[in-house]
């Protein structure tokens, strides 16, 4: 089979911990690899040169989009696949990707990212996101200094951007969230500084406030996160904006943290017909439960178990079954408890996991 006409573009700085595994996982697919180094003082460049001769220097100017676009400019192919050093390619159906590229020339490919987390007890958990990562550089480029986004070249920054996408048969494992707590907190503090400095530069402050909310949430500054996410939605209630599929559930999670569960519930009900995902339904069930509407919570959680994208919930998929069993137990329905205990065991076994009940 002919090589895929795709260039994998990576930006890096002091990534010797991750970059070798990243590049090693890319080798079987024989795609062009472009690595742009933004000022490493460790072995990052030395390692990268073992896998590709297209390693370039880029003077860091506090602008992730500038570095991404520079990397794309050095590629020989127009189709660009963006991968980070802490992401390892696990699945890629080459024939299916080729067909997608032929059918969706003017769209952006969504890639599944399995985010790995290590809990305090040493057990690993995960959740799965879909993010836009494959694009044709003739029509798209990156914008925003931090939390950069793929946007159409022919759309001005003061216009509404609607990103038309297609699903790619591609999965990577992301280990960038699997950091020591102190390192993660420092990373989020740095992000916040960049985000705050970028406010007012263009018409996309709504997106920046969303990211400010996300960083504050990770830092457990929930009141600050709530203030930022409210500013985001006050500026932009438009569900068609690409990031809103993440911002809508984020709003609910943040409001639950500040004990404003009724607002979270109202919010999710408003948008539930726009975003029909297992995550939305799971959060809706949690909000019903927090608000004491146990029957609605039960029915919603049962619906989640029947949804095709339940695996996207990661560990929360198991929590769905646990909550159903608890709600049945509270109502005295022991048959329901036994039935969903069996369903949970079956779900675990189908994912290579034996469920042990205490």
Image (spheres, rainbow, N blue to C red):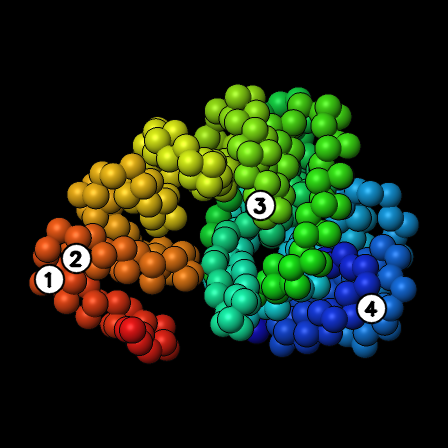
Measure the alpha-carbon separation of dots 4 and 3.
Answer: 32 Å
Residue behind mark 4: 44
| Label 3 or label 1, whichever comes before in sequence order | 3
Q: How far separated are the C-alphas under marks 4 and 2?
A: 54 Å
Q: Nearer the viewer, residue 189 or 128?
A: 189
- Dot 3 corresponds to which residue? 220
The x and y percentages for residue 211 are 62, 39
Q: Is residue 210 visible?
A: no
- The numbered disc on residue 161 is none
Q: Which residue is mark 2?
A: 329
The secondary structure type at the circle numbered 4 is helix
Above or below — where is 141 with respect to 332? above
Q: Nearer the viewer, mark 4 or mark 3?
A: 3
Please tell me which residue is depicted at 46% across the width and 41% down the height of the picture: 257
In the displayed structure image, the side of residue 333 where residue 259 appears, left or right: right
Q: Are marks 1 and 2 in contact (CB under 8 Å)?
A: yes
């Amino acid at each position: 089979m002919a090589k895929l006409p795709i260039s994998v573009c990576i930006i890096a700085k002091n990534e010797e911990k991750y970059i070798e595994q990243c590049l090693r996982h890319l080798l079987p697919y024989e795609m062009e690899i472009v690595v742009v180094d933004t000022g490493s003082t460790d072995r990052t460049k030395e390692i990268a040169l073992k896998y590709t001769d297209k390693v370039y220097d880029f003077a860091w100017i506090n602008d992730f989009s500038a570095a991404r676009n520079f990397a794309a400019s050095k590629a020989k192919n127009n189709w660009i696949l963006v991968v980070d050093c802490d992401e390892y390619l696990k699945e890629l159906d080459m024939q299916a990707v080729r067909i997608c590229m032929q059918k969706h020339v003017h769209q952006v490919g969504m890639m599944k990212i399995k985010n790995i987390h290590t809990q305090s007890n040493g057990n690993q958990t995960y959740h799965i996101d879909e993010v836009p990562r494959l694009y044709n550089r003739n029509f798209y480029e990156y914008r925003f200094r931090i939390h950069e986004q793929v946007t159409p070249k022919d759309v001005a920054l003061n216009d509404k951007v609607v990103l038309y996408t297609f699903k790619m048969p591609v999965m990577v494992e992301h280990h960038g969230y699997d950091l020591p707590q102190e390192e993660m907190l420092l990373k989020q503090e740095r992000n916040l500084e960049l985000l705050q400095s970028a406010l007012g530069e263009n018409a996309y402050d709504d997106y920046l406030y969303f990211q400010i909310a996300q960083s504050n949430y990770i830092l457990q500054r929930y009141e600050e996160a709530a203030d930022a996410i409210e500013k985001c939605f006050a500026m932009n209630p438009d569900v068609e904006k690409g990031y809103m599929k993440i911002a809508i559930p984020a709003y609910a999670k943040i409001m639950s943290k500040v004990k404003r569960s009724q607002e979270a519930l109202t919010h999710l009900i408003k948008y539930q017909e726009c975003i029909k995902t297992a995550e939305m339904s799971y959060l809706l069930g949690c909000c019903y439960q927090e608000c004491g509407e146990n029957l609605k919570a039960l029915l919603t959680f049962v619906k989640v178990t029947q949804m095709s994208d339940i695996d996207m919930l990661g560990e929360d998929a198991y929590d769905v079954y646990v909550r159903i069993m608890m709600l049945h137990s509270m109502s005295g329905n022991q048959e329901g408890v036994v039935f969903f205990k069996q369903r949970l065991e079956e779900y675990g076994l189908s994912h290579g996991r034996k469920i042990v009940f205490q």
